[in-house]
Amino acid sequence: MSKIVFWSPLHGQGQTSNLHIISLIMSLLHKKKVLMMQTHMSMNNLEGPLLGKNMGTLDTGDACIFQDIGLDAAVMYSRMNMLIGDILESCCITFPNTSLLLLPGTETKNRETFERDISSSICRMISNAEDNVDIVMIDTNSGKDDLSIKLMSSADVIVINLTQRKHILSKFFSEYGEILNKHRNVFFVFGNYDRYSGFNIINCLRKLGKYINRDNSGVIPYCTKYMDAQNDCNILSMVREGLYSSKVVGNYKVRGIIKRIIKPGKNSISETDYFFYQTCRTTMKILNMVNTSGREALIERSRS
């Protein structure tokens, strides 16, 4: 039903890590059927923290893990007008007791072949997949990549992944102003966030208030436990445990997490609790923007 494109001005801004945690919270906490996918040919770690193996770094003995599934298969079925329901899921890796679908990346190693056979049909494939899930989360190439720019033009929300490094912020706002001028549906995420930095979110709002406000921005704090779970390829269990802790009050809603973290007499917040609190808030803001975008699209269609 909705497309969320994750993009960053430079590689290495924590984009895939941000997509992972937001997708898991949408699926586990908000009960959304989420499709995670990527448009990279290399240098991406979408599959690893969930499976322990990446499409781009397989040994011969591991190839069977991704046999006959993934982006290449989904594109093929889309061209045949067959990418519906069970067919889409057959192209993905699923996880017990979740509504999460992982579509592994392409097996194509040749850039020309990828652009001819896969890249040219990805937009159509995503459009077909949208009819079968609540949200498609797309991990795109950074910078001025043609496919990324094309996907952003049709996205319901564009999540721009930034860090608190001054030169990254300067580069983005000086070189990519057209994105801000062209798209209203932009959401800024500061990953590996350090609340004690001089470039904390409050100061960023002050300095960059022309572009960033409380509604279109959020943070994902640095968390040692989350980093270790990524290294151990165990992020699903880590997030499930963090969200469904016995300390959470009620029906595992965000208000329960907030009640656990911020309560009278609690002078300090653990790193992990702060991570989940802020990331849940960021996820809710993105979902609010998705809902707003959907309502605006309905209004536009009714006028035409």
Image (cartoon, rainbow, N blue to C red):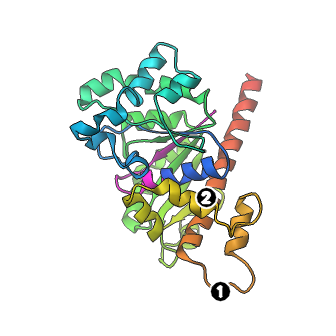
In screen coordinates, is 154 left or right of 292? left
Find the magenta span and give its range.
1-18
In magenta segment, residue 172: no
Nearest the viewer among 229 and 144 is 229
- SS for dot 1: loop
Query: Which residue does the numbered mark 2 point to in the structure image?
Result: 282
Query: Which residue does the numbered mark 1 point to in the structure image?
Result: 267
Looking at the rendered image, the quarter that the C terminus falls into is top right
In screen coordinates, is 18 left or right of 288? left
Image coords of residue 83 (percent x, y): 52, 21
**Label 1 packing within 10 angstroms: few (<14), some (14-19), many (20+):** few
Q: State how far apart marks 1 and 2 are (Cα).
A: 23 Å
On the question of residue 61 being in view, the answer is yes
Image coords of residue 68 (percent x, y): 37, 26
Image coords of residue 297 (percent x, y): 69, 32
Nearest the viewer among 30 and 168 is 30
User: Residue at (70%, 42%) from the top-left corner?
Assistant: 291
Looking at the rendered image, the quarter that the N terminus falls into is top right
Vertically, is 48 above or below 78? below
In magenta segment, residue 17: yes
Identify residue type, mark 2: Thr
Image coords of residue 176 (percent x, y): 43, 49
Nearest the viewer among 117 and 166 is 117
* First-in-chain label (1 vs 2): 1
Viewer-nearest of labels 1 and 2?
A: 1
Vertically, is 85 above or below 16? above
- SS for dot 2: helix
Q: How many marks?
A: 2
Identify residue type, mark 1: Asn
On the question of residue 210 being in view, the answer is no
